[in-house]
Image (spheres, rainbow, N blue to C red):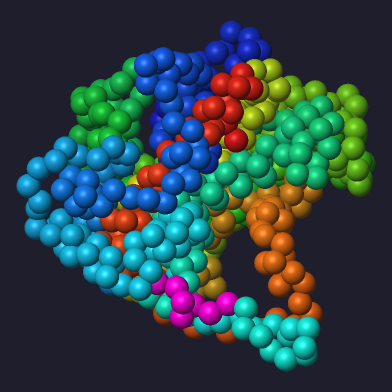
């Protein structure tokens, strides 16, 4: 959802699909977390009878790889990419199917050498791919060397695990990154956890009672104000068909119809007129602006119910979960799910006399009134939200709450830019990557320069220059919304441990366990290892896709989890 304040968005309450005439919201909320094959549509054609769909066990459970086909099909060139500094990057595609057989390019020659080297190493390909599968196909796994010892029945230390018996003498551990541009497999897992966290606060589960689905909830979208005209795509497809001439002599007009992937979208029509400092400082103050918005919203809700501010704070609570999304122009806007609860009994009965329409009205009132001081300002300037404001009632008709959870979860794995150039902190605030638009480069440079000025040093803008000044987390929630990421991971660990063989279960009950680990690096050692790992990643992704679609068709449910 990348818009600009020059466009006039609806500010009235809109319902989710199945609750009225506003059915155009289906596409906006019909995204399914946990998969990397694209959003799921509302209709799912059945598999032709002559081509039966493979079972998840047949796809993801098999650890055998046809090396003959892999070496001659050119798949090595397609999959030869790794974030590790050990191996150079090779451009890849996202297709699951291999390319037709043909001449082996030079890059594939390195892949062949790497695979042959793996064949001759201890453990061979089978043990290596087993390790990759246990790391969920991570693209930049952490390589750890070490051992685990425990005090046995005799009272003497016994060796329980040693990485010397593994391929290359190391254990591969998934990096756990949330960013899609860094590691899609780990980001897929994070997106699934984010979906579970958000959905449990809307419809119950994960320790939250199902009665939570009776609480009124609203999907709120808040945008940044305009800092200058930028290239855009209006609903009619135009950019800026009319306009004036700025003081620098540039015509603020663009008669083009920009495509969805046009790099010009989000770029300033006149970079000299664009308020880069204001945009950076707004990003730096978004978290505080949101905190005050929640305070104003609770007061506004109490006012609509005939309560004083003190009474509203004593009786009610607004629980929320929100995600931050970077627009093409580099400004942050927020998507938040807000739920009305009774204080001290947040997961109990729904509060009386509060319907979603009243909650949406309170949120709109708060978003219009709230403001915060601009960091470092000596003129009393204040930040406010942009003119675009959207409130959508979230109900359970046609799985509306699950769709809303999926809508938020998909933003949890995104970053500042679509190429991952700004995924890491910058040592000097200079980013000379051709993939990064000049507009974002200017925002990064402005954040770095402002961080060195007097009065803004305590804001830490240089530390956050890679996020154009934004200092918050991309996904945050109130304490009583639902469960936590830590609890979801602990539950997944308990589930895996419970399915271990009995002999391994006994080893886990030792009273004294000592683990010694040494960091050996990250990523894979050769391009051949990268090729094998990406093949395993494709198998696992396809297996999850088949399992999800099979479960969806069996349950008659349109939203995957």
Q: Could you tell me if residue 140 is visible in this image? A: no
Q: Does 364 appear above or below 495?
A: above
Query: Relative to 100, is 305 above or below?
Result: above
What residue is drawn where x is 71% and y is 22%? 396
Question: Where the C terminus falls, by quadrant?
Answer: top right
Q: Quadrant of the N terminus?
A: top left
The residue that appears at 46% across and 80% down in the rendered structure is 164
Range of residues picked out in magenta:
161-167
Asked if residue 349 lies left or right of residue 517, the reply is right
Query: Which of these two is toward me, 362 or 423?
Result: 423
- Is any part of residue 551 visible from this angle? yes
Please say whether residue 449 is one of the residues in the magenta stretch: no
In this view, the residue in front, 283 or 188, is: 188
Residue 305 x, y percent position in the rendering: 87, 28
Residue 226: quarter of image? top left
Quadrant hosting residue 10: top right
Q: Is residue 353 left or right of residue 330?
A: right
Q: At 45% across and 51% down in the image, what residue appears? A: 185
User: In the rendered image of this protein, does residue 238 appear above or below residue 302?
Assistant: above
Q: Is residue 242 left or right of residue 166?
A: left
Percent from the top left, x then y, of residue 68?
21, 50
């Amino acid at each position: 959802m990348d818009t600009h304040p020059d466009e006039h968005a609806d500010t009235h309450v809109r319902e989710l699909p199945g609750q009225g005439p506003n059915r155009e919201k289906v596409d906006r909320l019909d995204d399914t977390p946990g998969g990397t094959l694209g959003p799921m549509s509302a209709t799912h054609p059945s598999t032709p009878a002559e081509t039966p769909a493979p079972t998840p066990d047949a796809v993801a459970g098999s650890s055998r790889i046809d090396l003959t086909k892999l070496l001659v099909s050119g798949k090595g060139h397609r999959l030869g990419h790794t974030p590790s500094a050990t191996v150079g990057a090779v451009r890849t595609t996202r297709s699951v199917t291999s390319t037709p057989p043909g001449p082996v390019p030079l890059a594939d020659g390195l892949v062949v050498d790497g695979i042959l080297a793996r064949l001759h190493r201890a453990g061979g390909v089978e043990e290596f791919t087993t390790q990759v599968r246990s790391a969920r196909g991570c693209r930049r796994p952490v390589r750890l060397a070490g051992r685990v010892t425990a005090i046995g029945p005799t009272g003497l230390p016994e060796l329980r695990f040693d990485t010397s018996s593994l391929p290359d003498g190391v254990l591969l551990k998934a990096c756990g990154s949330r960013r899609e541009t860094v590691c899609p497999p780990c980001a897929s897992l994070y997106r699934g956890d984010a979906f579970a966290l958000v959905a449990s606060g809307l419809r119950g589960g994960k320790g939250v009672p199902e009665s939570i689905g009776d609480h009124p909830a609203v999907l709120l979208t808040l945008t940044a104000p305009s800092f200058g005209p930028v290239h855009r795509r209006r609903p009619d497809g135009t950019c800026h068909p009319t306009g004036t001439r700025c003081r620098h002599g540039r015509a603020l007009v663009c008669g083009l119809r920009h495509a969805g992937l046009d790099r010009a979208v989000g770029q300033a029509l006149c970079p000299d007129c664009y308020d880069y400092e204001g945009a950076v400082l707004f990003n730096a103050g978004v978290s505080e602006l949101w905190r005050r918005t929640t305070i104003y919203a609770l007061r506004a809700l109490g006012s609509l119910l005939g309560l004083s501010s003190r009474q509203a704070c004593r009786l009610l609570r607004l629980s929320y979960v929100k995600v931050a999304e970077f627009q093409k122009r580099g400004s942050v806007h927020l998507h938040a799910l807000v739920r009305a609860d009774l204080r001290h009994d947040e997961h109990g009965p729904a509060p009386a006399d509060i319907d979603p329409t009243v909650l949406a009205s309170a949120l709109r009132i708060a978003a219009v009134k709230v403001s915060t001081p601009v960091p470092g300002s000596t003129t009393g300037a204040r930040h406010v939200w942009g003119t675009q404001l959207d409130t959508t009632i979230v109900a359970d008709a046609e799985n509306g709450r699950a769709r809303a959870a999926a809508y938020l979860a998909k933003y949890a794995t995104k970053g500042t830019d679509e190429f991952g150039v700004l995924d890491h902190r910058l040592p000097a605030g200079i980013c000379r990557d051709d993939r990064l638009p000049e507009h974002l480069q200017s925002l990064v440079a402005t954040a770095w320069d402002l961080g060195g000025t007097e009065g803004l040093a305590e804001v830490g803008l240089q530390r956050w220059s890679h996020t154009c000044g934004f200092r918050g987390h991309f996904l945050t929630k109130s304490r009583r919304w639902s469960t936590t990421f830590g609890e979801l991971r602990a539950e997944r660990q308990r589930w895996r441990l419970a399915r271990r063989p009995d002999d391994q279960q006994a080893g886990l009950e030792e009273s004294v366990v000592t683990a010694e680990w040494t960091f050996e690096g990250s990523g894979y050692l050769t391009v051949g290892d990268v090729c094998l790992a990406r093949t395993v990643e494709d198998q696992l992704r396809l297996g999850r896709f088949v399992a999800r679609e099979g479960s969806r068709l069996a349950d008659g449910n349109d939203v995957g989890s």
